Image: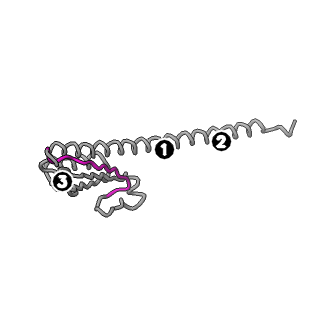
């Protein structure tokens, strides 16, 4: 009988340890879920913003070449769009490239961003060849008709 003394206490400690590990695992999963959810929101916002500018360029076909460039360049609608990019995405930047071709323009819009945690962890956001600050990016390329009559 003396050999069994304290076994209930040992079993209770093991049960508390197993329960604590389970709670820590659930907390870790919740933290990853929140991070992945915010990443998905940033990606959705970037896609929406890129498509929004492409749609605006389709409406303003006569001034399509003026949209090319980086932040702050171009018509007022583009400047407002860049302000929205900076407002919705953390540490964001964007570039717009316009290649004029007969009857069409090939438009490439790239939106880049990095989260505050990534900026802190990496000692800053990386800059690509175009000067866009990003660790993540969303790019679209559209062909926009610039002339109603093409031969």
- Mark nearest the camera among 2 and 3 is 3
Q: Nearer the viewer, residue 134 or 138?
A: 138
Which stretch did the figure color magenta? 133-148
| Local secondary structure at mark 2 | helix
Which residue does the numbered mark 1 point to in the structure image?
A: 32
Marks 1 & 2, CB-CB < 8 Å contact? no
For the residues labelled 1 and 2, the Cα–Cα distance comes to 23 Å
Q: Residues within 10 Å of mark 3 (few under 14, many from 20)?
A: few
Q: Residues within 10 Å of mark 1 (few under 14, many from 20)?
A: few
Per the image, is 150 magenta?
A: no
Which residue does the numbered mark 2 point to in the structure image?
A: 17
Label annotation for residue 122: none
Query: Looking at the magenta stretch, what is its main secondary structure?
Result: strand
**Residue positioned 36% across, 59% down in the render:** 125
First along the sequence among labels 2 and 3: 2
Which residue does the numbered mark 3 point to in the structure image?
A: 102
Q: Residue 6 placed where, x, y %?
A: 78, 39
Up-down relation of residue 27 to residue 123 (above or below): above
Q: Single out the residue that lies furthest toward the right.
A: 1
- Mark nearest the camera among 1 and 2 is 1
For the residues labelled 1 and 3, the Cα–Cα distance comes to 49 Å
Q: Residue 92 placed where, x, y %?
A: 30, 53
Q: Nearer the viewer, residue 14 or 94?
A: 94
**Residue positioned 47% across, 41% down in the render:** 33
Q: Residue 105 placed where, x, y %?
A: 21, 52
Marks 2 & 3, CB-CB < 8 Å contact? no
First along the sequence among labels 1 and 2: 2
Q: Residue 19 placed where, x, y %?
A: 63, 38
Is 69 left or right of 21, judged from the image as shown? Answer: left
Coloring scheme used: one colour
Per the image, is 134 magenta?
A: yes
Is 68 left or right of 30, judged from the image as shown? Answer: left
């Amino acid at each position: 009988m003396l050999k069994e003394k304290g076994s209930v206490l040992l079993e209770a400690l093991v049960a508390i340890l197993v329960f604590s590990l389970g709670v820590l695992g659930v907390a870790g999963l919740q933290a990853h879920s929140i991070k992945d959810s915010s990443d998905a929101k940033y990606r959705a916002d970037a896609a929406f913003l890129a498509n929004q500018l492409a749609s605006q360029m389709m409406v303003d076909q006569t001034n399509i070449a003026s949209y090319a460039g980086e932040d702050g360049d171009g018509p007022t609608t583009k400047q407002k769009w860049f302000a929205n990019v900076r407002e919705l995405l953390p540490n964001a930047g964007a570039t717009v490239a316009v290649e004029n071709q007969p009857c069409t323009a090939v438009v490439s819009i790239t939106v880049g961003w990095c989260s505050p945690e990534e900026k802190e962890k990496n000692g800053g956001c990386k800059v690509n060849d175009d000067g866009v600050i990003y660790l993540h990016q969303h790019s679209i390329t559209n062909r926009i008709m610039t002339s109603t009559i093409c031969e």
